[in-house]
Image: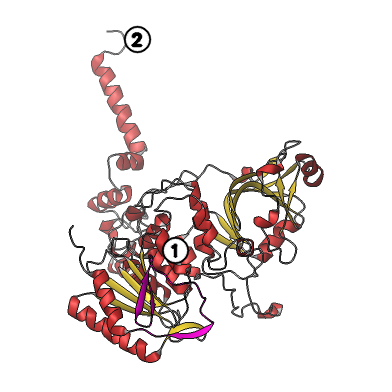
Amino acid sequence: MRWTAPPDRRETLILVFALCVFLFAYHLDNSLRFFGFDPAATHGTMLRSLGFGNPKVIGIDGRRPPGWRDSLENEIFGTWAWEEDEVLGDGAERSQEIGKGKHDATWLGRKEVGELRGGSLGDLTVNDGFIRWGEDVPMSRLVRHISGYSILDNVIIFNKIVYVVSDDPDKFPPSMKSIITASGLGMNEWKLISPQEARERLGSYGSILHGVTWMSADTNPHNSTLLALWRTYSSLDQHITSSGRTSLVPPTRLFFPQVRVFTDPNPLPHFHMIRRRRVDTGFHPFLLKAAFPQLTVLYQEDWEDYHKLPVPFVIERIVVADREAAEAAIERDQPVFSPAFNLPSSRNWWEPIRHTLLSFFSEAPSKKKTVTYIHRQSEETGVRLRDDNHVALVRALKKMGRDYGYEVHIVSSLFDETDWATRMSAVSKSTVMLGPYGSDLLDCLFMKPSPKTTLIEFFPSGTFARDQEIVARSRDIHYVAWRNDRRFTSGNLPAVDQPLNRQEASVDVMALTRTVREALAPLKLQ
């Protein structure tokens, strides 16, 4: 055979084999990874078997290969197993339930969390914060409206005024005051203008606040603000399921345009580390972070910043709650948040929020029937139970718990006495909740739903208010108003006569505990 003859089959196989060996050796690390081996560990084993000295190879976990680790390295670093994308340790550190550990912190591991959820991640980029509309100014739309509670699309804030742009004013209320009445310092004035006027006032471009924005226009926020905002927003999905599934996207920001961040005077610049007193928003700050983790709270200072900028901002969708506007339209005996409950809704309107809070606590469902008594004995204002009645009721509830196997919680309305997590954990497991009249009982929204779920509210003689009754009824919670030795249910409620700021209520403890036992008794088959 001449030397210029083409290679035969044997020679071709030898060449291919040699080339494969060369590529495998040249890219040894990648080859080992492809076959599931740790390159550093393999190098260490090979070098040690050949009798060479300490290798300088460091593994992907930051340590030397197993064959070359000494006692000092193990002392410093430990002998933990290492898994990619996981925190180093024996596995116990990857998640922790609330209430455990040194600092009561809680977190979840990657396996519990799963992949990042939500279709919005990546839909918007930093390039989407500015729009040029030219002659076509974004047109506003009234999506839902009842006095004091409204949903609008494309409202524009600029130079101390909130603009509603429309070429058909008849689609909006005759007066903007049924949407917004409170104007505060003058940076929350709402105006309905034509597209032509909008072009003259607003120009041809601006920025945009994407997503859903909430606004509480009240100068004094209330404990009902959060539930009224969600009740208004939930009217857009009348098919919320009992498991909390909804098509509603989470709200992105909550504006308090009339409320400053802190209530105390601003300190001098060099005292900036002094702890400040935050404003009371009407709800516990932990509740917002646990039940609405995507929501950012913005205050009057932030609202002013937007108005002082030289370009208008389009709010893509805004849900507005204004108690002053609502109060002008309700009857004397109605709670100020009641108009929001006249909007269409699913019977499961609160379930997405309740399930989010339950996920936060990550507790196994209690197998016992649970009773929670929220007392106000340390409060200086509002309604409280007579001291002797309170002591007798606590004693009777604890005895009932021992005798019947119920889980009984006695919690205070003051978070200095009962921390927020303890109180909300107890409420979320409760079948029966009871306590004196007050906004603390709005937490009944988070009670465990069942045909036996019951709220019992104590009133001073001759008084009654429907605040908690309306909320309970919207959640199919049995409601009982209690005065002295009499109980009133939804079918025979007394006339409304608001309790005074400082009053004591009295109860017949034996009759009350009997009612609690009846509420917890098994349902009788028909």
Magenta highlight range: 480-507
x and y percentages locating residue 345 in the rendered image: 46, 50
**Closer to the camera, 176 or 462?**
462
Q: Is residue 137 above or below residue 331?
A: above
| Amino acid on which the number 2 mark rests in the picture | Thr
- Total number of numbered discs in the rendering: 2
Say which residue label 1 marks: 471
Q: Quadrant of the C terminus?
A: bottom left
Q: What colour-coding does the image apply?
A: secondary structure
Residue 117: image location, x then y, percent: 42, 48
Who's the residue at 43% across and 54% down the image?
349
302 horizontally vs 367: left or right: right
Image mark for residue 4: 2
Residue 135 figure quarter:
top right
For marks 1 and 2, the one nearer the N-term is: 2
Number of residues whose C-alpha sits closer than 10 Å to that of mark 2, classed few (under 14), some (14–19) or many (20 or more): few
Question: Looking at this rendering, what residue extends furthest in the bottom direction?
Answer: 388
On the image, the x and y values in percent for residue 122 come to 51, 43
Q: Quadrant of residue 304?
A: bottom right
Instruction: Specify few, some or many for label 1: CA neighbours under 10 Å numbering under 14, 14-19, or 20 or more.
Output: many
